[in-house]
Amino acid sequence: MTSTRPYLIRAIHEWLLDNDLTPHLLVDVTVEGVDVPVEYSKDGRIALNISPGATEALTMDNTGIGFRARFGGVATEVYLPVGAVRAIYARENGRGMVFGEQDDEPEPGGDDDGGGTAPRRPALKVVK
């Protein structure tokens, strides 16, 4: 199956814009394929404003995110593999989503590694 990460990034981006918030991405600049001005990063991470006013020609697909933006007044092409995105959030209130380092990590306690216990069956309770 394909990763859910690019779909979630696009959906939250749209949701933030619909609510008049400023979408930002937190990106791990150490991931292979990331093309950003690393001099603006701190501790291997960079926060990028991806609002329509801050970017030009924004494209988001299942493999990456690309756009033009200004860094220190210099127009720069930016490209991010979706696996490098660690979070998408609103500048104003921090609402958004944080991602793990691995795409679609299995839930703890799953039996996909052969050594875990079987997942518990959901218990439903009738409430009147």
Image (cartoon, helix red, strand yellow):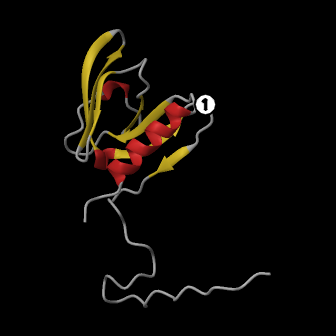
**The residue positioned farthest toward the front in the image shown:** 128
Task: Judge from the rendering whether residue 31 lies leftward or rightward of residue 125; answer left or right.
Answer: left
Residue drawn where x is 58% and y is 42% of the image: 95
Q: Amino acid at mark 1?
A: Glu
Quadrant position of the N terminus in the picture: bottom left
Residue drawn where x is 37% and y is 66% of the image: 105
In terms of image quadrants, where is residue 29? Answer: top left
In terms of image quadrants, where is residue 77? Answer: top left
Q: Residues within 10 Å of mark 1 (few under 14, many from 20)?
A: few
Circle 1 sits in a helix, a strand or a loop, which is it? loop
In terms of image quadrants, where is residue 93? Answer: top right
Residue drawn where x is 37% and y is 85% of the image: 111
Task: Judge from the rendering whether residue 123 lies leftward or rightward of residue 12; answer left or right.
Answer: right
**The residue positioned farthest toward the left in the image shown:** 33
* Percent coordinates x, y for residue 27 in the rendering: 37, 40
Q: Is residue 43 visible?
A: no
Residue behind mark 1: 92
Residue 38 versus residue 106 in the image, above or below: above
**The residue positioned farthest toward the top in the image shown:** 73
Residue drawn where x is 26% and y is 18% of the image: 76
Quadrant position of the C terminus in the picture: bottom right
* Percent coordinates x, y for residue 60 in the rendering: 29, 37
Residue 123 versus residue 7 in the image, above or below: below
In this rendering, the count of numbered labels is 1
* Percent coordinates x, y for residue 32 in the rendering: 20, 44
Q: Is residue 21 visible?
A: yes
* Percent coordinates x, y for residue 14 in the rendering: 45, 37
Q: Nearer the viewer, residue 56 or 81?
A: 56
